[in-house]
Amino acid sequence: MSLTIALSKGKLLAGTEELFLRAGLPFPAREGRRLVVPVDGLRFLLVKDMDVPTYVEHGVADCGVAGRDVLLELEPDVYEPVDLGFGRCRLVVARKRGAAAAAAASTVRVATKYPRVASAHFLERGRSVEVVRLAGSVELAPGLGLADCIVDVVETGRTLAENGLEVAEEVAASSARLIVNRASYHARRDEMSRLLGAIAKARTA
Amino acid sequence: MNGVSHRLVQVPPGVQCFVGDEARRRRQIEADVIAVFEGWDYEEIIPPLFDYADVFSSRALLPKTYSFVGRDGSLLALRPDFTSLLAKIAAGRLAGRPAPIRLYYSGEVLRYEPPRAGRQSELFQMGLEHLGGEARAADAEVLAIAAECLDGLGVRGFVLALGHVGVFGGLLAGVDLDAATLERLRERVEAKDPAGVRDALPSGRLPERIAEALVRLATLSGDAGVLADAEQDLSFCPPARAALAELTQVIETLQSAGLGPGLTVDLSEVRGLDYYTGLVFRAYAPGLGFEVGGGGRYDTLLARFGRPMPAVGFMLGLDRLALLLERQGARPSAPPSPAEVVGGGGLGRALERARGKRAAGTRVRFEGRP
């Protein structure tokens, strides 16, 4: 049986394709609509970025590519042997420019796609927190009064600036990681180490 | 009215109910595993379902333990694992029994578990503990038993991944680190994430070669050849080297007993319950995304109960084994042949006939009518 690889259809796909081609590995064609794509002895699952760790943790996929930001949020029980180096971004707390007063409030209201990361960040610093969970366009929340601040990923900071926000604190740095199911790592060691070897080599090349 | 009846049949999250073939298959697996335990001269212990909360000392299990206050004000807990209970029994009830003591158990443990891969709040575990006796022999014995259980159940392609917590522990022995940093390092080593280990290193507070060895540790897993690599990487650190030598000895013993092919070395396996002090292992097989069981050596746990004694044990998860065997396409045990229907000719006479057939060992279905 061939190895199954879960990939996010989102922003990490281009970097993953480049890496796989450099490693001499097959990769699914971009135009298809199929979500399970067998290519030359590998099987690819194309899923949402927040779902990649779930597929890998359950062993439905043997490995996958996921952002460290997503891994911090979901804390899946998987191995993370390779930092793939692309998809670099930062998880940050951002608030309205000059909104120092909100930072002093006793309970922080934070809008985010990362409820676990956001609440842990404030609780660990002794701040009470109220999480407003959103699925997207998080940058809107402070301007509309839905939250005091947001926890989100930023690459260039342009979206933040366009919405009148600025970075207040950095929570964590993120990049794409290769994640591996724990059982596949051990029970399918030969195939897995060939794949890992090829990817690690292309990563440093 | 409808609302009420719906609520009454609702199942609380985390518990399971097994019917028919599923129940039969579980009982069969349990019987097969117990037969192996008994075959190696282990004796059954049926421990209580709850005990004083402080018996269960594992910090890792503490947040998952269902605890409650007893009528007399004492803090009690539903057993979240068996090992602590068996250690207590060996040190108390069986205090006069000479070592080694070989005990096994089969039953449920209860844990608060968030819903995720392969975890329920009610877990059925079958396991054994080898208390006292010669450590390397005991390590090899329990690993051989684990392999025999999986073999006997027909699990295909299983692997026992062996590590030793003394490698990680030895590297950090005598190094003054705060608990949070230590936990982050452990967690990143477990994730086999060398880049993450590097990020988690406290700057300037660890000697360079220890830091480098920790980063390397995250990559040290694979076939027995890993042991030689590790020996080089750890040569500067006597306690880590000693741990590695123990592990090597166990692996060599198993190899010479013909158990080599199903083994892998996993030195970054440093997770596990916090009472482990030496060898640790997990059993994996293709078809299931997580381990079916595991165990390890816990040489300090018995001292808590006043009978210091080295010990080693392992357990297999029945829920996981059942799932794995199903995924691997194992044939379900044959359903029983239909029962013989007995009835007619007056209730008393019919019942008498049914009892007669039962005495002869026949399976009957009683359909008598008055």
Image (cartoon, rainbow, N blue to C red):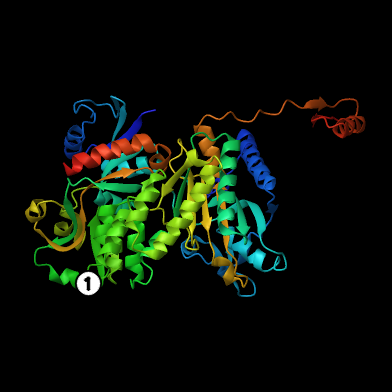
Task: Give the amino acid at mark 1.
Answer: Ala
Q: Residue at x 62, y 56 (%)?
A: B130
**Residue A12 visible in image:** no
Residue B230: image location, x then y, percent: 36, 53
The residue nearer to you, when weighing B2 against B177, is B177
From this view, report whether residue A98 is shown above or below residue B120.
below
Please indicate whether residue B165 sits to the left or right of residue B65 in the image: left
Please indicate whether residue B44 sits to the left or right of residue A17 in the image: right
The residue nearer to you, when weighing B243 against B303, is B243
Categorize mark 1 by other alpha carbons within 10 Å: few (<14), some (14-19), many (20+): few
- Secondary structure, mark 1, is loop
Q: Residue at x 20, y 49 (%)?
A: A175
Residue B16: image location, x then y, percent: 56, 45
From this view, report whether residue B329 is shown above or below residue A70.
above
Q: Residue at x 31, y 29 (%)?
A: A42
Q: Chain of mark 1?
A: A
Residue behind mark 1: A105
Extreme-bottom residue of the structure: B73
Residue B59: image location, x then y, percent: 47, 65
**Residue B90 visible in image:** yes
Rendering quarter of residue A44: top left
Q: Quadrant where the N terminus of chain B lies?
A: top right
The residue nearer to you, when weighing B347 against B309, is B309
How many discs appear?
1
The residue nearer to you, when weighing A59 against B146, is B146
Q: Quadrant where the C terminus of chain B lies?
A: top right
Q: Residue at x 32, y 50 (%)?
A: B219
Residue A76: image location, x then y, percent: 36, 49
From this view, report whether residue A183 is shown above or below residue B213.
above
Rendering quarter of residue B182: bottom left
Rendering quarter of residue A165: bottom left
